[in-house]
Amino acid sequence: MYQDSKLFLNQAVIKDWEEHYAEVFGKHILLLQHSLHELPIFREENLERLIEGCPTKYYDFVKMGKQGEHKKSWRRGSIKDVKGSDVLSAIEKGRFWLSLQSLQEWDDTLKAVVDHIFDDFSEKVPGFKPYKLKLGMLISSPNAQVYYHCDLPAQSLWQIKGEKDVYIYPNSEPFLSDQELEPIFLGKSEEEISFQPWYDQFASKTTLKPGEMTHWPLNGPHRVENHDCMNISVTTSHFTDEVRNFYAQTYANGLLREMGFNPKRNSAGLTKYSKIALAAGHKFVYNKFFAKPKSPKAPMDFTVDLSASDLMKNIEPISM
Ligand SMILES: [Fe+2]
């Protein structure tokens, strides 16, 4: 644990909190100032060590295709035995992203940080009892994009370095249809959902700069475009009982729809069948999510090579 991090743990994470934000938290989009980016763990030399120490199962290192090219052309790489400084250089100069996942499981400092973040929100928002807290980090090249998608747990995005445009859309039809949401909960489709360019007319567009974070309503679809600079962002995710119940209900609705019913997303009076499905779904989903088996990933078939024009070299594919 870094000395300055201990100081951070005694401070409020959010710098500009106002009491009435508690009424908005989780229900509407919030844009707030934070102090996370001042933590020593985000200094370059410490990030390099963090990258070098990341267990293989907790990262995805990806070479993106050209701008606008489909994700299918992307490749998954290995950073085993690559210096952290070389990984950062490749990301800064090329078209890569590195996602470090579930840092709370393998880095004590960031475990303390995510706990502190949610302790802070729990103090500020009456009745807020989050659990299954996760912290991830995305280090991405200039102009990289994250395509339109929705996340299942509640999410926040914290900007550490660089600038990005974040577009957040309403979590309702037509931006997020039940027919697209339910298969994600059922594990039958990815988190990416269909997008129409006109959706942007209804998006909340924010440029996130270091020291800014945003939190949005559950499952709110979003997409992200980096400015012409390397970006470092942190994501935090959490569950509450309300989120978990919605999760189960949507799962149950997905089952009902497959059975030929047409359930409402937030039905108040549940039918007998939906109650049965809800109960079954609740148990199944809870187990499924909390002990979620990872779907097989593409093999890693390249590594960083700063001497190559494309900053990478092919390796024997490694399946992990
Ligand atoms: Fe997301």
Image: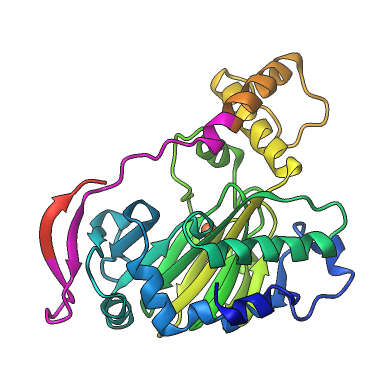
Dividing the picture into quadrants, the one containing residue 35 is bottom right
Where residue 246 appears, as percent x and y from the top left, is 70, 38
In the image, is residue 98 above or below residue 265?
below
Where residue 214 appears, as percent x and y from the top left, is 65, 69
Task: Read off the magenta span.
Answer: 287-313
Dividing the picture into quadrants, the one containing residue 138 is bottom left
Dividing the picture into quadrants, the one containing residue 159 is bottom right
Residue 300 magenta: yes
Q: Nearer the viewer, residue 56 or 240?
A: 56
Where residue 56 appears, as percent x and y from the top left, is 32, 55
Q: Is residue 209 visible?
A: no
| Type of colouring | rainbow
State the residue at coordinates (61%, 22%).
256
State the residue at coordinates (75%, 57%).
26
Where residue 208 appears, as percent x and y from the top left, is 58, 79
In the rendered image, the quadrant that contains the N terminus is: bottom right
State the residue at coordinates (51%, 64%).
223
